[in-house]
Protein backbone atom coordinates (compact mmCIF):
# COMPACT_ATOMS: atom_id res chain seq x y z
CA UNK A 1 0.00 0.00 0.00
CA UNK A 2 1.41 3.39 -1.02
CA UNK A 3 1.39 6.19 1.51
CA UNK A 4 -0.39 9.40 0.50
CA UNK A 5 2.93 11.29 0.34
CA UNK A 6 4.49 9.06 -2.33
CA UNK A 7 1.23 9.00 -4.27
CA UNK A 8 1.15 12.79 -4.29
CA UNK A 9 4.73 12.93 -5.57
CA UNK A 10 3.91 10.47 -8.35
CA UNK A 11 0.88 12.52 -9.41
CA UNK A 12 2.91 15.75 -9.36
CA UNK A 13 5.59 14.13 -11.55
CA UNK A 14 3.05 12.68 -13.97
CA UNK A 15 1.23 15.99 -14.37
CA UNK A 16 -2.30 16.39 -15.84
CA UNK A 17 -2.18 12.97 -17.54
CA UNK A 18 -1.38 11.25 -14.25
CA UNK A 19 -4.14 13.22 -12.55
CA UNK A 20 -6.76 12.06 -15.07
CA UNK A 21 -5.51 8.46 -14.73
CA UNK A 22 -5.76 8.72 -10.94
CA UNK A 23 -9.31 10.07 -11.18
CA UNK A 24 -10.31 7.24 -13.52
CA UNK A 25 -8.77 4.65 -11.17
CA UNK A 26 -10.65 6.12 -8.19
CA UNK A 27 -13.91 6.02 -10.14
CA UNK A 28 -13.29 2.38 -11.11
CA UNK A 29 -12.50 1.45 -7.50
CA UNK A 30 -15.70 3.11 -6.29
CA UNK A 31 -17.81 1.21 -8.83
CA UNK A 32 -16.15 -2.06 -7.78
CA UNK A 33 -16.86 -1.42 -4.09
CA UNK A 34 -20.46 -0.69 -5.05
CA UNK A 35 -20.71 -3.99 -6.92
CA UNK A 36 -19.01 -5.97 -4.15
CA UNK A 37 -19.98 -4.49 -0.76
CA UNK A 38 -17.90 -5.65 2.19
Image (cartoon, rainbow, N blue to C red):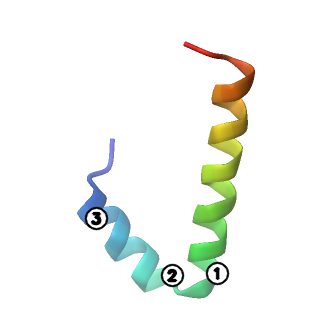
Label 3–label 1 contact, CB within 8 A:
no
* Left or right: residue 17 compared with residue 15: right
Among the two numbered marks 3 and 1 on one chain, the one whose residue lies closer to the N terminus: 3
Splitting the image into 4 quarters, where does residue 13 fall?
Answer: bottom left
Tell me the CA gap for discs 1 and 2. 6 Å
What is the crowding at mark 1: few (fewer than 14 residues within 10 Å), some, or many (at least 20)?
few
Count all numbered tags in the image, as a single digit.
3
Mark 2 residue element? helix
Q: Residue at x 72, y 36 (%)?
A: 31
Mark drawn on residue 14: 2
Q: Position of residue 34 (x, y in %)?
A: 70, 27
Q: Residues within 10 Å of mark 2 (few under 14, many from 20)?
A: few
Q: Residue at x 35, y 70 (%)?
A: 8
Element at label 3: helix
Seen at 28% across and 64% down, the residue is: 6
Residue 19, compared with residue 29, is above or below; it is below
Where does the image place residue 28, in percent across and percent down from the top left? 70, 45
Q: Position of residue 1 (x, y in %)?
A: 33, 41
Query: Are dots 1 and 2 in contact, CB under 8 Å?
Result: yes
Is the Cβ of the residue at disc 3 closer than 8 Å to that at disc 2?
no
* Label number found at residue 6: 3
Q: Is residue 8 left or right of residue 11?
A: left
Q: Which mark is residue 3?
A: none
Q: What distance separates the C-alpha of mark 3 from that of mark 1?
A: 17 Å
Residue at point 36%, 63% (across, down): 7
Residue for badge 1: 17
Q: Secondary structure at mark 1?
A: helix
Amino acid sequence: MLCSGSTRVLIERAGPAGLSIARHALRTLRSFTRLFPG
